Image (cartoon, helix red, strand yellow):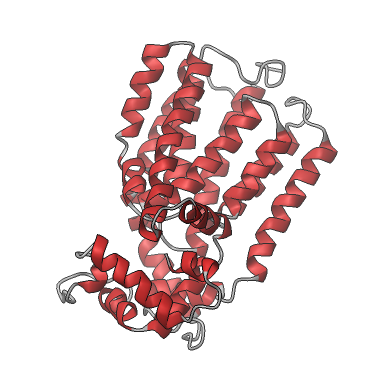
Amino acid sequence: MGMIYKTEYPEMKIEEIHQKVYDELREKAPDFAGFASVNPMVEEVAEGESTYYKIISQNPKAYEEELQLFVVKPFYNFMNWSLFKLGFSASASVSLVSIISYALILILIFSFLIKILKNYPLAFILTVLISLFKPLSESARHVSADSLSCLLLLLSFYVFLVRRNLFIAGILAMLCVLTRPEYFIFYTFLYAFIYLYRNRLQIKTVPLLLSYGYLFLSFFLVQAFNEVSWSTLFMNQFTKVQIYPVSQPDPFSFADYFHFIKSNIMLEFNASYFPLLLIFIVIILANRFTFRNKKNQAQLLFFAIIYTTVMLRFLVFPSLVNRMMLGFYLIIILALIYIQISKVDIFKNSLEDGK
């Protein structure tokens, strides 16, 4: 909400922006955490986390530095601002982005399932079941970039695999990175995967490299305007929540970082859906699997890319919160459905068995 007002009214002082945001929140969401008394019984991931929202609700300067953390999501900010320009309130705008993205994700999933299953009742049933998937329904209820980034990720896959349009798929990938920059890791691996199978996928090298070049530039454009370093973000999120992360960041401690990684990696992984999905991956791929089969090799490499990305992302941002992993979950689920019961070979004339 603050980014909306900052964009629409560039001359407005932070005190005024802060006042407008919290006046609207008090009216629309009186139970918002920032207005509640601090609960000493709430378990904190980082020291001071339970008091954080209350402090920024009372401190315009602290709120201003909080806004800087959202600069790395320019497309998400643009979508919020666009809905605001259409006449919605700031609070309604940020909520609608999540709700609309949720609805479009379901429509896209249904379209994809129709394409590969050629069975409307089955596609509808699977779409309904996926709509009940907890991380997906949670993303619709939360004001965050999770739903929008997931939508753009799925759209880029759909356009590339079904519509066979590398250019548009690359644009959607750029927008996904401009919504959540950490997806740059995943797309980098995907472009390497496509390059490896470019002949079978009938993709020319020059357009592929140009497409990745645009993706690369979009990521580093975001970093050029990012005033908050990775080390500051880590210390702020996982050790001690800082009220002034830009002007007064805590020094980075590798010992604290290593301790957090070592003590939380298995806990976070096991608390996610990744172990369960890995079981299904092994069961489905094990059916008539052989390393000599080119199609099997591609399937195995694709899932390896997803899990490698997830673990690398954990090293950068040590959290596997289910809602933030939504895009990876849905890609795995849809890929498994395709491998197991697809009636259409979307890789026709490319990844043919044994060739």
- Give the camera-side residue of 117 and 93: 93
- Residue 157 falls in image quadrant: top right
Residue projecting furthest to the front? 87
Please tell me which residue is depicted at 66% across the width and 37% down the height of the picture: 169
Work out which quarter of the rendered image holds the C terminus and state it. top right
Is residue 60 visible in this depiction of the protein? yes
Query: Relative to 155, is 254 above or below?
Result: below
Is residue 243 visible in this depiction of the protein? no
Work out which quarter of the rendered image holds the N terminus and state it. bottom left
Please tell me which residue is depicted at 66% across the width and 59% down the height of the picture: 219
- Give the camera-side residue of 158 and 261: 158
**Numbered marks: total:** 0
Q: Is residue 340 left or right of residue 155?
A: left
Query: Relative to 149, is 204 above or below?
Result: above
Residue projecting furthest to the right? 206
Q: x and y percent of residue 139 in the render?
A: 36, 47
Q: x and y percent of residue 37 in the render?
A: 17, 76
- Residue 353 falls in image quadrant: top right
Query: Relative to 100, is 313 above or below?
Result: below
Q: x and y percent of residue 135 in the render?
A: 34, 44
Q: x and y percent of residue 334 in the render?
A: 47, 29
- Give the camera-side residue of 296 and 136: 136
Q: Is residue 21 left or right of residue 64?
A: left
Query: Relative to 241, is 141 above or below?
Result: above
Please tell me which residue is depicted at 72% across the width and 16% down the height of the picture: 349
Please tell me which residue is depicted at 47% across the width and 43% down the height of the picture: 327
